[in-house]
Image (spheres, rainbow, N blue to C red):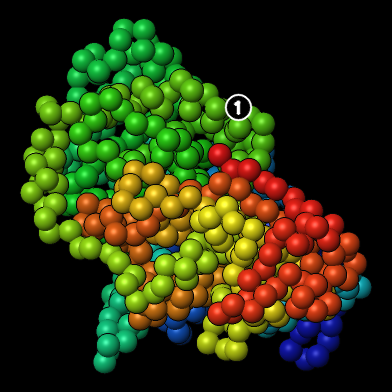
Amino acid sequence: MKIEKVYKDGVTSSMELDCKAHELQIVKDDVKIKVESCREIIHNAIDEQASQIDIDICYENNTNVVLTVSYSGDKLNSFENIDEIINAILELNTSYKRSRSDMIGGMGRGLKLILSSEKLEITSINKGKEFKITIENPDKQIEQISNNEHQAFIINVEKEGEELHQENKVTFKIHNLSTGDISNWQHDSLVKYLKYYSVIGKIGDNTLVNNNLIINVQGLLKEKHDGKVTYRRKPQSEKINIDENVFDSIKKFGEDNDCSFNYIKGHNGTLESNVRIEDRLKEEEIKQLQEFSKETKFYIFRTTDKTLKRFIMRDTQEIFGIYPACRGVMINEKFTALKKTTITGDKTGGNLYQQYFGYFYNDIKFLPSGNRNYARGNDTYIKFIDELNEKIIGLINKVLAFTDSTCRNKTQKVKSNTEKKEKITFNKVEEIVIQGLFGELYHIYCYPRLIKHWVACERLGARRSPHDFEYNQKFDEIKTTITESNIIRISSVYQLDDARKGNLHIYYLKNHIGNAGTGDNIIDLIKKVVEKLEAYGKLWGDYEEKFFSAIADRLKFNNGYDFKEKYKSITNNPEKYDLSSLDRYTVLRRETYKIGKDYKFEFNSLQEMGIEFDKGFNLNLSKLQAKGNEPVIDEFK
């Protein structure tokens, strides 16, 4: 890729980097949540032997913040010239760390995350000399170069070797960094994120961090003015304690505050727990866990105690679950087996995602993907996860199960609060509307990338298109039905517009009215969709707020923010809510019909389309099939 350096006097100079813009775009978009960019800078600072790191967040609006991270130290290996800075943020798969086992990175990928911004300022002070560059719209520049490889990437050189007698220091200032979910930048949320997903939490008992390192964080505080939620910068920074393993601190807090919880820790063939493992497992099962712990460390809690859950997550939502971990960090990708496993004699039940918190740590099994943000995608990981599902998770659940003799106080508290549950209903919305929303959300669940083409999401508040999804001059129209009739109701003939190619997807649902344990209600489906979309990094960050606003609009909720907060409260505190009034559905199958003049069936008139006027329009599927437009049928189990 061609780089053009522009100096203050107008002089330019060029250089070539061995990287491609489209590869940079893939890496920089490889972000689940925006605070990962903060973590990557911290990891670089630790690798470069910083003695102090300062993190400062300034609020601009509910979609943008300014992130400033500075690190300094007498032994700091700061950038020695402009080209070193450029190479660090743009050159892929090249790193001076690769041959060093005591370093966190090594793939030459981490700093690329900061390119997802509108402006970058990077300053380095090295041996009394200052170097500074600014980059305008790095995100857009990379996108443009991906489409035109002859275009140069423009970097403004502000200072090059000017004398400045200060200690070695590096500062990254990232302007208009898209927030995704701004709650992640709240002070307590940010501190918790860094503890769990960076090496400062000492996950897996790593020794990559010097206990003398000083880390100061100054995040955002949430407040309300005239009923509107806003944020401001925390007046004073907080020094993060990095003296102990963050999971040891959870255990200590639980013990000191008489919280109800079970835990198990495995390390180098030794098992530790606050329950008698020999009462829960057979001798051969204990040996199996001990052998497993020789290769894979694990530390897992199970709790329904509100005080302990609050300590673990503070304002950070949806953090509970079990995670893979390697190279000193948990990978922000929840382990999926928990939802499928139930324990005989378990006294709480419920969604285990809301009760478990912990990790399985294995550098060999999880690291081959070369990416701390995503473990999946390589055969080693897949085989290891299968092994965990088949042989280990069941044993962990046996040890941590809540019985009459464990977590007794918490079980009694849950029972005593059943009458105080808040009943969730959407009485203002017709059931047919909820069924329609269910179908569209399930379509996104099947094809997550379509979220950016969801008309309800993209054109919120504007005049709606007749179609549910529009993309590349094509469209998808979604219909749901709970009968086996060949008649499908549509509100407008334009939903089947044949001016361009499209698909009519009909989802056949089974309604489980009054059967709380079968199928999914609308909240359950939203949770499934969100969990899947979280794996799409930048895409989810860009559309998360629109997604919740679109759902709030359809369910006639106040606004997207209020609905999102209510959704998080429901999923994180299920014991507080009664969802029995929400109908549950199972998707039985999907029939897909093609629309457009290039197909055998053409829509030329209402009669030929099989549409008859009857309080709207009815689409007769048997007539479509008679015309030769046979559907593609997908069965769901």
Which residue is located at x 48 percent, y 27 percent?
388
Residue in the foreground of this view, choosing between 384 and 232? 384
Q: Where is the C terminus found, in terms of image quarters?
A: top right
- In which quarter of the view is residue 394 placed? top left
* Place of residue 386 in the rendered image (x, y in percent of width and height, measured from the top left): 55, 27
Q: Which structural element holds mark 1?
A: helix
Residue nearer the viewer, 184 or 171: 184
Left or right, residue 637 beside residue 523: right
Residue at the disc numbered 1: 383
Q: Image quarter for residue 87? A: bottom right
Q: Residue furthest top?
A: 283
Q: Is residue 76 visible?
A: no
Viewer-proximal residue among 596 and 301: 596
Left or right: 414 in relation to 555 = left
Residue 11 image position (x, y, % from top left): 83, 86
Q: How many marks?
A: 1
| Residue 157 percent coordinates (x, y) | 71, 80
Amino acid type, callout 1 = Lys
Viewer-closest of 103 and 164: 103
- Quadrant where the image shows the N terminus: bottom right
Q: Where residue 51 sits in the image (x, y, percent)?
A: 43, 57
Q: In the rendered view, would you say 25 is above or below 3? A: above
Mark 1 residue crowding within 10 angstroms, few (<14) / some (14–19) / many (20+):
few
Observer able to see residue 10: yes
Q: In the image, what residue occupies the spot 45% across and 78% down?
A: 553
Residue drawn at x 63%, y 29% as measured from the top left: 380
**Left or right of 342 in this view: 129:** right
Which image quadrant is residue 204 in?
top left
Residue at point 88%, 62% (across, down)? 600
